[in-house]
Structures are given as C-alpha cells and as structure tokens.
Image (spheres, rainbow, N blue to C red):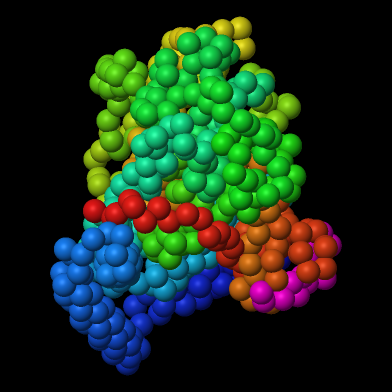
Amino acid sequence: MKYWQLVTGLLVAWLLVIMYMSNSVFPNASDTNLRTERQLQRALDELEKLRNQNLELHSLAKQLRDLKFEPLGSEKGQDASQLREKLDSMGSQLQHSFAQTGAVGAGPSLEHEVARREMEHVSGEFWLYIHAELTKMKEAAVDPDVVRTINRILAMAGDIHMTLRNKQYQLSEDVDAAGDWRKAEAARLTDLVQRRIAFIQNPSNCEKAKKILCNLGKGCGYGCQLHHVTYCLMTAYASQRTLILQSEGWRYAARGWESVFLPLSNTCHSTHGQPSTRWGPGAMTDNTMVLELPIVDSLSPRPRFLPLAIPEDLGDRLTRVSGDPSAWWIGQFVTYLTRPNTDMQAYLENSKQKLGFESPIVGVHVRRTDKVGMEAQFHSLDEYMGHVEDWFNTYEKRHPDIQRRVFLASDDPEVLQEAKRNYPNYIFVSDTEASKTAGLGSRYTDASLRGIVLDTYLLSRCDFLVCTFSSQVCRVGYELMQPLHGDASQWFRSLDDIFYYGGQNAHNWEAVENHDTDEPGEISFRRGDLIGIAGNHWNGFSKGKNTRNGKTGLFPSYKTVNKIERFKMPTYPKVKEL
C-alpha cells in the first residue's frame, strides 16, 4: 500500500507545483493590469530622467562651445577641460540609462528574468526529486505489476516534464522576442568586455605601463593551465595592468602560447629591465612596474575580484542576460585567451567541415584514463546518453523529424566504437586522432594540443553539453559557450560536480525560505542564511554548510538560489560602448 500512497503523493505535489508555476507565468487579468501599470510608470520615470539628462547635456555642450578657443593653460581652459570630463561622464550615464530601459532593444526586466529562472530552477529540481524517488521505489519493488506501473508513471511524468520545459523555452525565447533581445544584449556586452580587455592589453606606451607577469609552467594539463592564465588575465584586468605571459618551453608546445593562439598583446611583449616584486598584500595599490603572480593555489588571502565574482558596473546587465553570470564573465577571458592564430583557425574550420559538425548536435565529453579513480568516478556511456536522449526528446517536440547527432570527445578511443554499436540511431561526430593523442603516452605533443583545442572549440559550439564538471576540459567548453549565445546557462548536464573554477572564492547559495528538518543527514536553515555549497546530488537535494551555525548536510535545492558576488572593478571609461 505504501507504494501507491507515495506515488499518489508525489504526483499530486507535482501537479500543485505546475499549477503554481502556471499562475506565476500566466497571471489573472487584474494582476496583468497591475503589472502593466507598474511597467508604464517605470517607463515614464525613466523617460523623465532621460529628459533631464538630455537638458543637462545640452547645457554642458553650450558652455563647452563658449570656452573651446581658450588656451589650455588658462583658468577658462581648465574649466573647458573639466566640462569635457563631465560631458563624457554624462554621456556614459545616458548610455547606461538607454541600456537599462531597453532603448537599445526592448527586453524583459531584471525582475522578470530572475523570477523566470527561479521558476525553471524549481521545476527542474522537482523533476529530479520525482525521478529519483520513483526510481528508488522501482528498484526496491518485488511485484512485477508495481514495477510496470511505476515505469508507466515515470514515462508519463517525463513526457509532462518535457512539455513543461518546451513551454518554458517558448516563454524565454519567443514571447515578445525575448530571445532575440537576449542575444543582442549578450553580443553588446561581449563586444564591450572584449574591447576593455584589448585596451588594457595594448597600452600606448609599454615602457610606462604597469604589468602582471605570469608563468605558464604550472604542472598540470591543458584545461588547468588555461584556467591558470585566465586567473592571470583577470588579475591584470582588476588591477589595470597589462598581462605578460612567459610561455616559452611550454610542455604542450615549446614555441609557447602563440604557436596556436593570437598574441595577448600587439604592443607589449616583455618586462625587460623593469623593477618587479611578488604579488602580495597591498598589490592593488602597488606602484612597482611589474608584479609577478604566483599560482592561484598559493594566494593568501585571495582577492575578492577572483571567481565567482562579477564586476559591479555590469552586474545588473549580466544578471539580466545570463542565468550564470560568473561563468559568462570567466568565459569572456577564456575567449580572449584562446583566439586562434591563422593556422589554428584554418585547422578548426576545416576540421569542423570534414567531421560533418552540424546543428542540432549535443556535445558529450567522456573523460577516462588518469581522472577515473583519482579525481572522478567512472560513468558509463549509458549515463551520458540517457541525458542526450532526454534533450533530443524535448527538442523534437518543437522540431520533429530531425537527425540525432552527437559530438563525442574522449581520451579513450574505445568509447566511440561502443557508442556506434549501442546507439545506431545516432550519428556520432568524433576526431579519432584527437582521442588517441589525448592518451597519457602522447598527451604533451603538438598533435595533442591541436586535438584538445579542437575538442573545446566544438564542445562550445554544441546545442547542449553532457559531461562531468570535474573535468577542466568540460568546464572550458561550457565557459566558451557562454559568450556565443544569449543565455547558455542551462545548456548542460553534469554527471558529477556543479560548475566551479579552480582557486575560486567561497561559493554560497542563499536560502529563500525557511527549512526545518529532523531528518538524519539534513540541515535546517532560515531565510537569508548563506549555504556554502559542496555539490548538487541531482536528486532534489544538495550538500552544503550553513555559514550561520557551521552545520553541514543535505538540504532541498529548490529552497535556495545562487548568491552572485559583485566586486567594484575598473570600468575603463575610455572604452565606449558601441
């Protein structure tokens, strides 16, 4: 009897959640009218601010015209200089107001985007809970009729979940052209950040520019070394210094970073003859010409600008456009660092065409060899493909009769043969040479480097990613994916860890409602408590530590949201938004 009570209880709870979310997404008429009135009032308020800013700009411009012929050294010349600075500042404020009000392209409000993503988060966590609990009941059942019934319920519940996900997709992408706005806004932000990085990396006078010195010789693999250089570039950005990378003798390519990627700077390549000091306390205000960076693991204390922090000046816009602003921000630096040189660009494009890489396509990264048993657990190919099946089943509800295609990247050549044998209804796109050179015996070679660059490049161009976030290659693919799309924060399924950055500062989730429990292994918390996250168990529960009372244990994931830290970084006012 207990099986039917549990099953009925779970399904009733799920229906209540769906009804609640439907009311949230499609409110009644009175709620709609009230929301419309509020939006109209906000728009009128913003227009009034824009009108006042416009009047002030005209006044400043007139004063500047009256003073433009005064000598620079005179008192009036100094007034003119101050007016120019104020005019630039007002222009930036006006441009920011346009971006916030949607004048550069209408889009949903920040509040709408946050609420929508929280709804998707709760919906996803509830399905994980339902699926996990029903699966446990099925595995414990001995009556074949009970097993068959649970299988039917799982199939129906799964189909309802896929339908709900498609409705959520429609809401996020199609309604009011929100998807188009999100892509355009993400492109504007990407352009701005990339030009800011290029600005700091290309000083007009290298001799006078302050610099960060970074050594590539960290003893680890490609993904780990790339993230080490990413941390160096982020530090350069936050401290307004130019990054100089020492990469000669690189274990992957003796000729260094520029053997596959574009130079980090076109104007500044060395620190020859300039005084240097080791990064330490007070480094942000240190006037020494060159600061040498240690590896991130040895930094103490770690600066607050390091991941998973995002810049304060772009915080609202990033949170509005992306469900994972931290990964998006990291992805900008990884993107700048991995701009392919001419030869590598040709290799990537030719390989993509030769392999038959076409959308829709799901990227699967299967890491075996040295990772399994040391840094990660073994996961069968069937585990990966189960999530691939789910994605295509959902996608086909919107796009029927498509060819199922998978880009398979692995350091184990046998995985491809297993995939072709067990999943004949899929086309598997894979570079077998890259798999061979990814093995331990030939990993640190030019061929291996080209192969892993190709893998991360193609993984980032997939429509969905199934992998293990314990792998740095997997996380690089996810990071590179972020700047390419409007919002790719949900375009993945990790079989183990949540997204993280090696050497990151504390990652906290914030409780959005109280949770009281006496269940063994679980923790209680109050609304507003910060939970130091240790991982999502992908069954409705996560593990973490309540920072208020120091207790560690499991807790329901849906009662928390990701806490995004913001740090006041340089805004580079000379780099104007286009």
What's the residue at 56%, 11% (across, down)? 249
Q: Position of residue 147 (x, y in %)?
A: 61, 50
- Counting every numbered tag in the picture gives 0
Residue 415 or residue 476, whichever sits in front: 476
Q: Is residue 241 visible?
A: yes
**Range covered by the magenta-colored residues:** 516-528
Q: Position of residue 29 (x, y in %)?
A: 29, 89
Q: Position of residue 261 (x, y in %)?
A: 40, 23
In the rendered image, residue 137 lying in the magenta stretch gets the answer no
Q: Position of residue 429 (x, y in %)?
A: 36, 23
What's the residue at 46%, 48% (across, down)? 329
- In the picture shown, does residue 169 fall above or below 328? below
**Left or right, 525 with reference to 389:** right
**Left or right, 147 with reference to 23:** right
Q: Main secondary structure of the magenta part?
A: loop
Quarter of the image holding residue 88? bottom left
What's the residue at 34%, 44% (across, down)? 195
